[in-house]
Amino acid sequence: MIHVLTAERLREVLDYDRGTGVFTWRIYRSSNARAGDVAGTSDNGYVKIWIDGRQYRAHRLAWLHVTGNWPEHEIDHENRIKSDTTFKNLRPATRKQNQENLNPIRANTSGHRGVCWNKKERKWHAQIGHERAHLHLGWFANIQDAIAARQRAERTLFTHSDGSHGKN
């Protein structure tokens, strides 16, 4: 992906607070955006910022602002909150690693990814997907046991190159 925005240009127009994840304008933009104003708008949970006629996601800008380089692949929000652009919450990730750190789908009644109640068996079912395979982790009378089985599988299968783990 070709990026026209450089770290130098970004730092020229925006300040970034690593601790809060907030971008503020350094320059006067218009009657709606003055120097010192918070930059960005919320769109589908992400913060997006327009710079020089192009829209960028704030988490990618945060990476560029701090490191001086665009991320090679994707940027994952470690705590799964799309609007949290604090630098400690961001990490480079492949598409696969980013997908491993998704929230449970809305239909999930257990509140834990890969754990669901099976009416027919009258037990909790733990499962996980990995490298195009659907892995059955077992049937459990207790939800905590099903969650623990899922978490063990995550630690085994989703170890990142930096030693951290995806949270599914």
Image: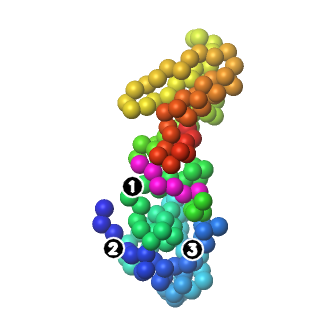
| Left or right of 2 in this view: 82 | right
Q: Is residue 7 above or below residue 77?
A: below
> Please, what secondary structure does the residue beneath circle 1 have?
loop
Looking at the picture, which amino acid does disc 3 mark? Tyr
> Please, what secondary structure does the residue beneath circle 3 have?
strand
Q: How is the image coloured?
A: rainbow
Q: Is residue 95 above or below residue 73?
A: above
Find the magenta span and give its range.
89-94
Binning the other alpha carbons within 10 Å of mark 2 as few (below 14), some (14 to 19) or many (20 upward) gives few
The residue pinned by badge 3 equals: 16
The residue pinned by badge 1 equals: 73
* Quadrant hosting residue 21: bottom right
Sequence order check, earlier mark of 3 and 1: 3
Q: Which mark is residue 4?
A: 2
Q: In whole angstroms, how far apart are the C-alphas of marks 3 and 1? A: 21 Å
Q: In whole angstroms, how far apart are the C-alphas of marks 1 and 2? A: 17 Å
Residue drawn 49% across the image and 72% down it: 65
Q: Is residue 13 visible?
A: yes
* Quadrant hosting residue 143: top right
Q: Is residue 61 above or below residue 117?
A: below
The residue closer to the viewer here, 146 or 46, is 146
Looking at the picture, which amino acid does disc 1 mark? His
The residue closer to the viewer here, 22 or 54, is 22
Q: Position of residue 98 (x, y in %)?
A: 47, 47
Residue drawn 60% across the image and 83% down it: 36
